[in-house]
Amino acid sequence: MIESEKYSKFIAAITKEVHERRESIEKQAREYVEEQLEKAEAELKDETERLIKRRAVTIREETGRELSGRELENRRELFACRDKIMAGVFDKAKTKITEFTVSDGYKAFLRDSSEKMRGKLPPGTQSLTVYMRKNDLIYKDAVEKTFKIPCAFEEDAEIALGGLRISAPPLLFDDTLDTRLSDQLPWFYENSGLTIY
């Protein structure tokens, strides 16, 4: 019996050692798996954060481009609207000017314009050229009387609204209604309340 006891004890010891080794191996395996899972989770978390950051940057850039595009389009629309309003205002002004050029006051306007330009001529000016639109050449005698020197008159197709342009080389004076109206453009931009920033 002693031998069978020894044998039983030997088997029990081997079984115990196998059991302990199995538990140790299982514990090591669990620890290894847990460690690998923690590592994988940390890597996954880092990769997810990097992806989220890259996506956030991409979204911000796309949103910025979209907003810039919209702002640019809105500014274009504003400029077009402002230009349309300005064109309307200046078209009305041209209509009023055209009405004025067929009124009784227009001849007096041309005389006053001639006197103003005569005051700018250097002393001793012997002659000059007066440029007028075709319809205004009927007033050339009144204009020449104002200048009190010989004048050559020429039709100027660039003068659409009326008024005078004179040349006494090397000087050129422009008091056309066209120029007066176009000179109002900067004033209109500043004072119309339609400035776009």
Image (cartoon, grey):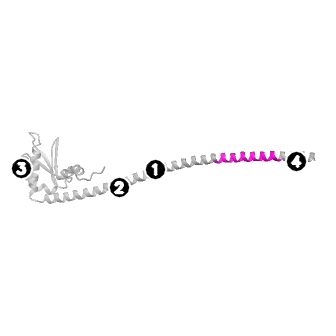
The circle drawn on residue 60 is 1
Q: Which residue is mark 4?
A: 8
CA distance for labels 2 and 3: 55 Å
Q: Position of residue 170 (x, y in %)?
A: 17, 41
Please name the residue shown 30% across and 57% down the image. Answer: 81
Please name the residue shown 16% across and 59% down the image. Answer: 96
Please name the residue shown 52% across and 50% down the image. Answer: 52
Q: Which residue is mark 2?
A: 74
Q: Amino acid at mark 3?
A: Lys
Q: Which residue is mark 3?
A: 145
For disc 4, the neighbor class at 10 Å (few under 14, some 14 to 19, many from 20) is: few
Mark nearest the camera among 2 and 4 is 4
Q: Amino acid at mark 4?
A: Ser
CA distance for labels 1 and 3: 73 Å
Mark nearest the camera among 1 and 2 is 1
Of labels 2 and 3, earlier in sequence is 2
